[in-house]
Amino acid sequence: MIAVILLGIAAFLVLAGGLAAFIIMLVKKVKWWGSCLVLVGVLGLTGLLVSAAVGFWVYEKSGDKIDSAKDFFGELEDFQEEAEEAMKEAEKVSDELDKVNTNTSTNTNTSSDKSESTTKDADYYKDQGMIENTDYSFLITVGEDKAKKITQKETVPLEGVTAAYLYCHQTTDNSYGSSECPTGTVEIFRISVYTVSQWNEVKDSPFAGTSMGQDGGYYFIFSHPNGLMPSDVSISGEFYSGVITSIDFAD
């Protein structure tokens, strides 16, 4: 811009000086062709200076535009790089969310499986041929057919016994009815629960029954009534032995 101003000033001075010289030559009556020659030279030089000034001005303006364009494209490239980085971060976040959703789905399924396994009811165990005692958390196996015909019933324990459970089998022979078992059933065995001290007091008695095992500070004792059973109740010594050894305590 300084060069443009200087050239403009020079052109003005040359033009002003040339015009003054032309006027002086006219006043002094110098030959007309000499005056015209001076005027043409002055105008030509002025034109060159003006052209140079205009050229520098255009050049500087073009340079500003080029620099602006370069800056614009530079900013555009920076924006594009930032956009690519943002897309990469978004993809990472999406992948993490997918992993979280997958883990959540897996955990939900696992929780559902655990929930199903912890909500098994008496019918479930009977379908497996077992009977569950929820008071002392144990299972006994009697066979699928027997499990559906046997009812577990808590009864009032004898003195020196902590708890007692009757196992009453369905029968159509009412002559074998029991005052403790429900109507239409007959007692086929019972499981009594003793503390350690209670069991130590009676364990040597011939009427004490058979120990099935101990858990949580209790002994679980198996006994069964003597005598015949109804004809529709098939019970054997092998069955009793299987029940005694089948007891399974929950962890």
Image (spheres, grey):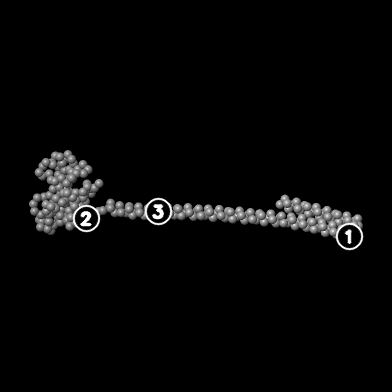
Badge 1: residue crowd in 10 Å (few <14, some 14–19, many ≥20): few
x then y, percent, for residue 72: 60, 55
Query: Taking the image as drawn, is residue 192 in sight?
Result: no
Question: Residue 216 lies in what quarter of the image?
Answer: top left
- In three-dimensional space, the C-alpha distance between marks 1 and 2, rounded to whole angstroms, equals 137 Å
**Amino acid type, callout 2:** Gln
Task: Name the disc covering residue 32, or none.
Answer: 1
Query: Taking the image as drawn, is residue 225 in sight?
Result: yes
x then y, percent, for residue 56: 71, 55
x then y, percent, for residue 171: 13, 57
Q: Earlier in the sequence, mark 1 or mark 3?
A: 1
x then y, percent, for residue 38: 84, 57
Residue found at x 13% / y 48%: 223
Residue found at x 19% / y 49%: 247
Which residue is situated farthest in the right direction here? 29
The residue tagged 2 is: 128
- In three-dimensional space, the C-alpha distance between marks 2 and 3, rounded to whole angstroms, equals 38 Å
- Identify the element where label 3 is drawn: helix
140 vs 217: above or below? below
Question: Residue 235 lies in what quarter of the image?
Answer: bottom left
160 vs 5: above or below? above
- Identify the element where label 2 is drawn: loop
**Amino acid type, callout 3:** Lys
The residue tagged 3 is: 99
